[in-house]
């Protein structure tokens, strides 16, 4: 009989290093992690592949799936930019013996935690400062000036959720952050 997996939910502000830390965790085979691919109504970036980073849906498709109650959690993160976790994707991973790793916004993290309770741990990745994040986002060159301003404005709101998470990690030194997140996740998964 296979043991049901556990849930790791990573969230944080844009430019906090969240994706880098998620990829680090996924590279650790001993953690037995499967990545939960979120759905998004935003446009695909040039380096992204359908079904790898996101399931890309049109705005109308996303809204239809909301009406049909097909999401475990969803949020309109920016105007007309919806993100969510399809129930079908999660159900496919549950019971497989894999642990599921989510990379979602702060409200989505709280929804997933509420749904899975003690089976889940939420981790908030805290940037060292807003100034550092601004530099990181500008260097990424993936955002228009308008989107860049929206993301920076949203950071203050997102940071207010950090104390609602199970654990907070300040990512001011990437090698230390990688070690700390790995140790935290491993200790929860192997309780």
Image (cartoon, grey):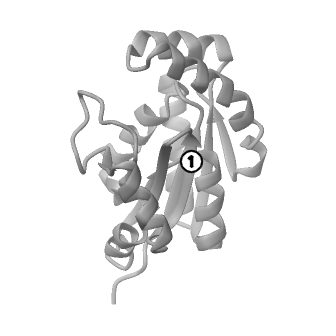
Name the one closer to the observer, 73 or 163: 73
Name the one closer to the observer, 80 or 2: 80
Question: In x, y percent, where is residue 190?
Answer: 50, 65
Q: Is residue 31 visible?
A: no
Q: Picture quarter containing residue 169? A: top right
Q: Picture quarter containing residue 127? A: top right
- Which residue is at the far front? 60
In the rendered view, would you say 71 is above or below 122?
A: below
Q: Is residue 161 left or right of residue 7?
A: right
Name the one closer to the observer, 30 or 34: 34
Q: Quadrant of the N terminus?
A: bottom left
- Label 1, on which residue? 76
Check disc 1 and report its element: helix, strand or loop. strand
In the rendered view, would you say 54 is above or below 33?
A: above
Residue at image position (49%, 28%) is 17
Residue at image position (60%, 54%) is 109
Name the one closer to the observer, 12 or 61: 61
Question: In x, y percent, where is residue 168?
Answer: 68, 41
């Amino acid at each position: 009989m296979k043991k049901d997996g556990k849930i790791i939910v990573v969230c944080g502000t844009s430019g906090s290093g969240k994706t880098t830390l998620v990829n680090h965790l996924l590279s650790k085979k001993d953690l037995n992690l499967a990545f939960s691919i979120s759905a998004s109504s935003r446009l695909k970036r040039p380096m992204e592949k359908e079904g790898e980073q996101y399931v890309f849906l049109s705005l109308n498709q996303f809204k239809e799936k909301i009406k049909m109650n097909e999401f475990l959690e969803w949020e309109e993160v920016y105007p007309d930019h919806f993100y969510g976790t399809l129930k079908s994707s999660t159900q496919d991973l549950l019971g497989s013996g894999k642990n599921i790793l989510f990379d979602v916004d702060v409200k989505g993290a709280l929804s997933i935690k509420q749904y899975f309770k003690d089976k889940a741990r939420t981790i908030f990745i805290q940037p060292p400062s807003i100034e550092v994040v601004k530099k990181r986002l500008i260097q990424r060159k993936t955002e228009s000036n308008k989107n860049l301003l929206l993301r920076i404005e949203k950071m203050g709101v997102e940071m207010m959720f950090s104390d609602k998470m199970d654990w907070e990690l300040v990512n001011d030194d990437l090698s230390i952050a990688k070690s700390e997140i790995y140790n935290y996740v491993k200790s929860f998964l192997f309780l």
